[in-house]
Amino acid sequence: MPSSRRTFLRTSAGALAAATLPGGLTAHVSAPEQDPSEDLPALHAASKTSFALNLEMWLGGQAFEDRIRQAAALGYKYFEFWPWRNKDLQAIQMAMAETGMKPTQFTAWGFVPGMNDPQNHSAFVKEVQASCEFAKQIDCPMMTIVGGNDQPGMTQPQMHDHIITGLKLAAPIAEEYGVMMILEAMNIRRDHKGHCLYGSPPAIRICQEVNSPMVKINWDLYHMQISEGDLCGHLREGIEQIGYLQVADHPGRQEPGTGEVNFARVLREAWELGYRKPVGAECSPSENPQASTRRLLHACTW
């Protein structure tokens, strides 16, 4: 065997061994170094996908309204967030007016109390009403709904049927306001063990049963990768029920370009299927916001 080939194989094997942990786990491999001189607005313009920065996972340590301003400075045009009840509405409106930033979605109903328990449906409907009123004040088109954690004594089909019932009760409110409820399927392998809704088939079935244009899926590609894989194939099967897409790489739940998912290919598939809305960057930045934004855009541009 030529010396150069032996050297290559020895070096490659050593690198693989260094990246492999006991039990078949893979160590984090650093993403390629980014060029800090790259112009962020130009990178955003080169991407067919517009991203909504998740302001809960990015830009911490400053007031929420200042995160909106900082996201705009990074070249983003959209943002998303989690609860709305702890936010200053007037401050948000002012920051939006200053920057032209627009919200895509926020969390209207979380894990507890579970919407998969009919005892909580009355409170759920009232919260949807209040959330729709808030959404209209900031011109937000969507809000996330979480199904709930497992309920003692209930089977998964029973809990899913209760979710259908709850969504049917609230759908007329969402339709009246023109605010889409997007139901999020989680993953139970890594992040949300004990949650009742994971993977795309049950989420698709629930939305089909509710049968409302204002009830669709918050299709988080991070959760779907962990739960079921075959991201492009499942996108094709579920596109009619997809209301919104989110991204985070796996492992690590950091920005695309740090893990195993070929997001350029997946987002191209979504584009070819007709998806044109912004995509939520619900991920933790692996570096400073500028470097992580560059990596996100490089990894998702085709």
Image (cartoon, grey):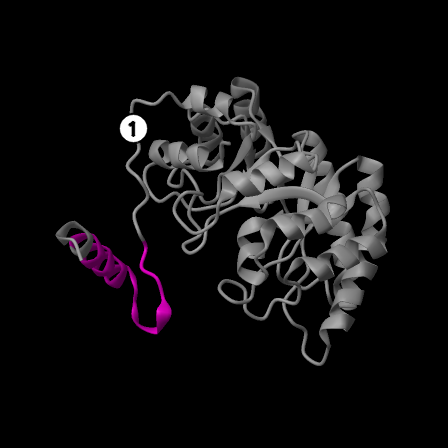
The answer to which quarter of the image holds residue 15 is bottom left
69 in the magenta segment: no
Residue at 70% x, 34% y: name it.
274
Q: Amino acid at mark 1?
A: Asp
Q: Is residue 181 left or right of residue 269?
A: right
Residue at 42% x, 56% y: name it.
251
Where's residue 260, x and y in %?
A: 44, 52
Q: Is residue 268 visible?
A: yes
| Disc 1: which residue | 35
Residue at 45% x, 45% y: name it.
57
Q: Which residues are magenta?
A: 7-28
Q: Is residue 296 left or right of residue 210?
A: left
13 in the magenta segment: yes
Judge by depth and name the residue closer to the eye, 81 or 89: 81
Q: What kind of element bears circle 1?
A: loop
Judge by depth and name the residue closer to the eye, 102 or 248: 248
Which residue, as the protein is rendered here, is positioned at the far bottom?
A: 153
Where's residue 83, x and y in %?
A: 58, 47
User: Magenta: predominant secondary structure element?
Assistant: helix
Which residue, as the protein is rendered here, is positioned at the far front?
A: 1
Q: Residues within 10 Å of mark 1 (few under 14, many from 20)?
A: few
Judge by depth and name the residue closer to the eye, 264 or 169: 264
Which residue, as the protein is rendered here, is positioned at the far left?
A: 3
The quadrant the N terminus occupies is bottom left
142 up-or-down from 94: above or below:
below
Where's residue 76, x and y in %?
A: 49, 27
Q: Is residue 108 visible?
A: no
Where's residue 42, x and y in %?
A: 44, 19
Judge by depth and name the residue closer to the eye, 226 or 53: 226
163 up-or-down from 216: above or below:
below
